[in-house]
């Protein structure tokens, strides 16, 4: 499977959350390359990865980081591929630090910032699939089936709650 999406994270301590993105991409049959790259601790390797990503055939890059979460922004500074930022909880500020650091990009260098934590990791993968599906009708069909399944789950929850309390 060719890797069309890069999943980067600032530390291996981010993996339990970022694994959600990897699992979902694999569920859709989308190949990904997973790397630990840090905007602060390995800035040269991070910039090099971002600069080469387009010529290596990636369609978009997902970046998860916590704390002073600059990974997505730094990657976006070195590529014009779509960059999706996942703010993660690390330390005492509950992820608000990472959310603000990821979302508050200056005009001209966009990062599509998703929710903090696992919901964000999953939505980052779905956004990446949506981007790829623009040119892939079969992938688009899988996306629509996924949405239908999500809707069915809510209907099932509704049925169970009504059965218990209705
Ligand atoms: C960030 O600092 C990483 O993305 C991680 O969320 C956080 C803590 O990293 P470790 O100290 O666990 O390596 O750069």
Image (tube, rainbow, N blue to C red):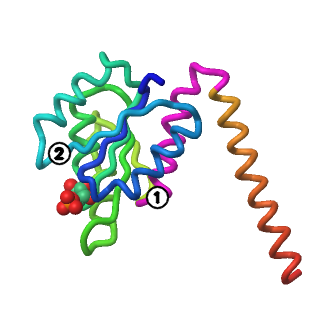
- Give left or right: position of 60 versus 35: right
Q: Position of residue 82 (x, y in %)?
A: 38, 31
Q: Does the magenta stretch include residue 20?
A: no
Q: Report the residue at 22% width, 49% height from top.
A: 70
The residue at 51%/48% (across/down) is: 123
Q: Distance of mark 1 from mark 2, alpha carbons? A: 21 Å
* Ligand 1 lies in quarter: bottom left
| Residue indicated by mark 1 | 118
Question: Is residue 68 visible in this depiction of the protein?
Answer: no
Secondary structure mostly seen in magenta is helix
Residue 106, percent from left and from top: 25, 43
Q: In which quarter of the image is residue 96?
A: bottom left
| Chain part drawn in magenta | 117-138
Q: Do the residues labelled 1 and 2 touch (CB within 8 Å)?
A: no
Image height of 157 relative to 62, above or below: below
Specify which label sits upstream in the sequence, 1 or 2: 2
């Amino acid at each position: 499977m060719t890797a069309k999406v890069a999943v980067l994270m600032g530390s291996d301590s981010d993996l339990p959350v970022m694994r959600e993105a990897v699992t979902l991409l694999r569920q859709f049959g989308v190949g990904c390359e997973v790397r630990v790259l840090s905007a602060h601790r390995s800035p040269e390797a991070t910039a090099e990865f971002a600069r080469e990503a387009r010529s290596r055939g990636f369609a978009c890059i997902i970046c998860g980081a916590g704390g002073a979460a600059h990974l997505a922004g730094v990657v976006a500074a070195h590529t014009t591929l779509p960059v999706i930022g996942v703010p993660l909880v690390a330390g005492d500020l509950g992820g608000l630090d990472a959310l603000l650091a990821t979302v508050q990009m200056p005009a001209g260098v966009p990062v599509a910032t998703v929710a903090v934590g696992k919901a964000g990791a999953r939505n980052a993968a779905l956004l990446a699939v949506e981007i790829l599906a623009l040119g892939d009708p079969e992938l688009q069909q899988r996306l629509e089936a996924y949405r239908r399944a999500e809707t069915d789950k809510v209907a099932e929850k509704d049925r169970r709650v009504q059965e218990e309390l209705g």
